[in-house]
Image: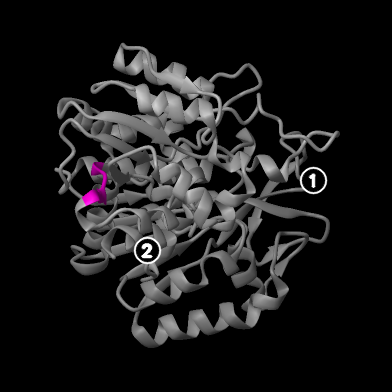
């Protein structure tokens, strides 16, 4: 439940509706929208007026040629339409998040109705954490609920600064946010063992703190994706033209040494599917990951690595997965990621606790058709990493303070 009085009140809810929308204005993955439904339903059942705010993409980073915002591409209107279908009612869409139209819509809204305001990132004040901008948003409601775990690590106006305008009895965490925190804490505080963490993606630098943290309590750490080649080079392997952060090789070696001292296994892919170009149409073959020839690059883990990883996972009681095993968006380099996705789902259905987070990992689970088998799918990428690293998230602190 939400530990704040909301019955009959106007409630401003920060959600994370940063969902993929194609050129035809169709939502291609509504996971984050579906995850917000329980909180919205809870509020509606309390006869609250629900005022939703969210961001979508980075519109100020991708301006049109004339320097203006691409309002069609980054508009939340498709989300309002989708919400109307989910709740089988009209969700009022307001074409701005501040200004007279928004003020009037929120003032005139009746209990039991839903309003969605336009993209907060149409204003630079949002990401700047501007207090005046936050105050304008706060003025719409009696209560503030933060249910946007995906942006909880950002000290933005609508995620953290806005909390200053509500006292402790006027603000709370949404049901999704509560679930996210509880599941992350389950991994950090009381994991059933063996506990195995799977980390993939492009860069070691993105996962350094996380790997350091999990060396302290995981039993095994599995590495995949582009970041694995930094580790392989650190062990004097030949990686051809594979992605590598040369300035991180010393750190990668240090992480391997530290894991050895703690008795934690770090598994690096023994073989790779390689290509002579970063393309699905490139020539491909399989070789040892430390013997990749010049002009070739590793784009997926190989068959031996898949079997090794599946064998390691077979005894796991707790599994955390963040990051793909390869460039799974290309069909010729998707086998590693999809094999891991299916294996995690299989183990979850047999009783293992599984936590999957990060956009690519979630996309892979959804693509596998096995999302229902996963114990918990997080809506957070960077936020989940930060939380698991032990950082205090501004979006949570704003509610607790």
When the figure is inspected, residue 210 is found, relative to residue 106, above or below; the finding is below
Q: Write the residue at 21% across / 68% down.
A: 189
Q: Nearer the viewer, residue 325 or 31?
A: 31
- Along the polypeptide, which appears first: circle 1 or circle 2? 1
Q: Write the residue at 18% across / 38% down.
A: 6
Residue 277's disc number: 1
Q: Write the residue at 58% across / 67% down.
A: 204
Q: Is residue 321 magenta?
A: no
Q: Nearer the viewer, residue 36 or 121?
A: 121
Residue 312 in percent (x, y) is at 35, 60
Q: Write the residue at 58% across / 41% down.
A: 328
- Label 1 sits on a secondary structure element that is loop
When the figure is inspected, residue 277 is found, relative to residue 98, above or below; the finding is below
When the figure is inspected, residue 139 is found, relative to residue 197, above or below; the finding is above
The region drawn magenta spans 170-175
Residue position for label 2 = 387
């Amino acid at each position: 439940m939400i530990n704040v009085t909301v019955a009959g009140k106007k409630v401003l809810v920060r959600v994370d509706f940063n969902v993929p929308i194609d050129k035809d204005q169709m939502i291609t993955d509504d996971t984050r929208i579906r995850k917000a439904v329980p909180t919205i339903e809870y509020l509606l059942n309390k006869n609250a007026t629900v005022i939703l705010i969210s961001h979508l993409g980075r519109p100020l980073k991708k301006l049109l040629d004339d320097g203006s915002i691409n309002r069609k591409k980054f508009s939340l209107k498709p989300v309002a339409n989708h919400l109307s279908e989910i709740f089988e009612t009209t969700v009022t869409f307001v074409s701005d998040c501040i200004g007279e139209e928004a003020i009037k819509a929120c003032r005139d809204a009746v209990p039991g109705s839903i309003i969605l305001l336009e993209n907060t990132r149409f204003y630079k004040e949002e990401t700047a954490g501007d207090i005046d901008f936050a105050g304008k948003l706060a003025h719409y409601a009696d209560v503030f609920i933060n249910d946007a775990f995906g942006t909880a690590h950002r000290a933005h106006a609508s995620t953290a600064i806005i909390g200053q305008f509500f006292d402790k009895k006027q603000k709370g965490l949404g049901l999704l946010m509560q679930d996210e925190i509880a599941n992350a804490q389950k991994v950090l505080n009381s994991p059933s063992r063996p506990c195995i963490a799977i980390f993939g993606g492009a860069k070691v630098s993105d996962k350094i703190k996380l790997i350091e943290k999990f060396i302290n309590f995981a039993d095994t750490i599995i590495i995949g994706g582009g970041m694995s080649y930094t580790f392989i080079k650190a062990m004097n392997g030949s990686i051809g033209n594979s992605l590598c952060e040369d300035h991180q090789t010393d750190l990668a070696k240090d992480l391997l040494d530290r894991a050895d001292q703690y008795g934690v296994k770090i598994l690096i892919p023994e073989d790779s599917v390689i290509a002579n170009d970063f393309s699905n149409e490139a020539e491909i073959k399989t070789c040892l990951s430390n013997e990749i020839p010049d002009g070739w690059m590793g784009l997926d883990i190989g068959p031996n690595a898949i079997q090794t990883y599946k064998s390691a996972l077979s005894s796991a009681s707790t599994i955390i997965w963040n990051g793909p095993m390869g460039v799974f968006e290309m069909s010729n380099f998707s086998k590693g990621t999809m094999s891991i996705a299916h294996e995690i789902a299989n183990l979850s259905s047999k009783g293992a606790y599984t936590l999957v987070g990060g956009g690519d990992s979630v996309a892979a689970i959804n693509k596998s058709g096995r999302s229902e088998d996963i114990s918990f799918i997080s809506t957070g990428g960077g936020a989940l990493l930060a939380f698991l690293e032990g950082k205090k998230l501004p979006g949570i602190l704003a509610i607790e303070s």
